[in-house]
Amino acid sequence: MPEYNYTAVTADGRIVKGQREAESAVRLQDLIAQDGLELVNSEVREKLRGRRYSSIKLKSAELANLIFQIGIQLRAGVPVLDALRTREGEEASGAQSTVRDRLGELVEQGTPLSKALEQFPRVFPGYIRNVVQVAEQSGSLAENLIELRAYLEWMDKNWKAFKQAMLYPAFVMAALVAFIFIALRFVFPTVTALLFELDIPLPWITRAMIACSDFVVNYWAVIVAVFVCTPPGLRLLFKASSQAVLIRDHLLLKIPYLGDVIRTLAVARFLRSLILMQKAGIVITDSLTMARDVVGNKVIEGSVQRIENAVANGSSMSQGMSKERIFPALVRTMIGVGERTGSMDDALQAVVDYYDDLVPRQIKTFFAFLEPGLIVCTVFVAGAVAAAVFLPLVNMLSPGAY
């Protein structure tokens, strides 16, 4: 509900200033009158409201649902103002209701929907605002909102698939690190004291494990601090330095198997975004700019930037893309075919359909190799610890074997 700063006068002529929430300026005047005051002027507290609205954020699934609800109502002929309003009994989170009510309020005041979306920068990214702006001008708002919903659901589905596949490897890695730390910090010092008391020859693996254990015992607090502080420290570094982000993204693409998965996901996002912009009627240079913003990898963003510059200078997109080996040959070929035949949308859709099948297969293949690899690594580490402990005892019981 809007909040107003107001100035009013009492019956005896005193000036009173204050703040009050009301559905509208007319309703505010009625509320002030009920208190025995006469309203002189009022204004919406835009700065405070702007800060509040700019902090609102929706999950991808919530945003897709919000856009679909509005789009399907518009396609059915419901006026945009009614489509934005939250109805009684309609399922919507508190944040979603706030977004819809505020958008409805701005549209009612005559603000274009694309301009109203700017009040929620964390809810509606730039590409959504641009698509809505073009759709308003072309009269295809309902169709473009439904297309946006399909795009957001695709993004959400692939991201959830990747996160779900990461759960098991992340759990195994965390357990392995915890096992190594506990073994070196608490278990091995006791075993080391026993071995020194027995005064028996120690094989190289036991000596190496003792050295590691001594390091962990002496510097365990530093090791824990590094593990705790590294993630937030890296996040701050990546926020402060674009060069650090570029180095990180370059290294990620170089990781065997995982780099291919990351590149495939980034290229798929780029193509999905590009076809969405093209269907919305946005010119190719602007489409490339908007698609670049959702790639999620600075190395590939740099490639798209160079393609955008080439197109702006008169080259075709396929010519610009031919110099960027980050894009697979199939993508370069299909875009070239689309440009020659004048059916870019069809060519992009064919590649997008291919990537819709490729992305989940690549994710499954990567983790099909990763999970057994982690198990082997865990067995190796556990075996090394066991060998370091028991080999000296075996040598002591079997002198001839040493």
Image (cartoon, rainbow, N blue to C red):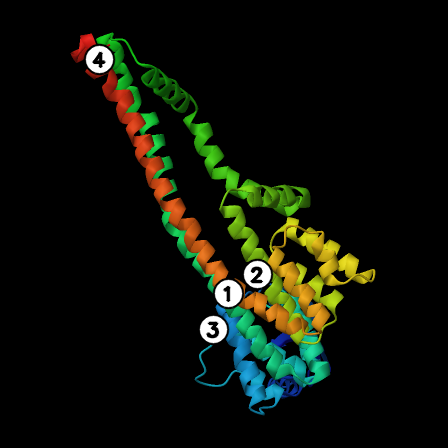
Between discs 1 and 3, the one toward the N terminus = 3
The kind of residue on which mark 2 rests is: Ala
Residue 11 vertical placement versus 183 (above, below): below
Question: Which of 212 and 399 lies nearest the eye of the viewer?
Answer: 399
Residue 78 vertical placement versus 55 (above, below): below
Q: Secondary structure at mark 4?
A: helix
- The answer to whether the residue labelled 2 contacts the one labelled 4, judged by CB atoms less than 8 Å apart, is no
Q: Secondary structure at mark 3?
A: loop
What residue is pinned by disc 3? Answer: 93
Work out how far the residue at label 2 is from the one at label 3, CA to CA, in angstroms: 30 Å
Q: Residue furthest bottom?
A: 77
What residue is pinned by disc 1? Answer: 356
Between discs 4 and 1, the one toward the N terminus = 1
Between discs 4 and 3, the one toward the N terminus = 3
| Tag in front: 2 or 3 | 2
Work out how far the residue at label 2 is from the one at label 1, CA to CA, in angstroms: 8 Å
The kind of residue on which mark 1 rests is: Asp
Work out how far the residue at label 2 is from the one at label 4, CA to CA, in angstroms: 58 Å
- The answer to whether the residue labelled 2 contacts the one labelled 1, judged by CB atoms less than 8 Å apart, is yes
- Residue 191 in percent (x, y) is at 26, 19
Quadrant assignment, res 41: bottom right
Question: Which of 128 and 355 lies nearest the eye of the viewer?
Answer: 355
The kind of residue on which mark 3 rests is: Ser
Between discs 2 and 1, the one toward the N terminus = 2
Residue 370 vertical placement versus 109 (above, below): above
Residue 268, label in figure: 2
- Residue 152 in percent (x, y) is at 54, 69
What residue is pinned by disc 4? Answer: 395
Q: Kindly identify the residue that appears in the image at 62 percent across and 56 percent down.
A: 329
Is 72 left or right of 106, judged from the image as shown? left
- Residue 55 in percent (x, y) is at 59, 63
Residue 337 in view of the camera: yes
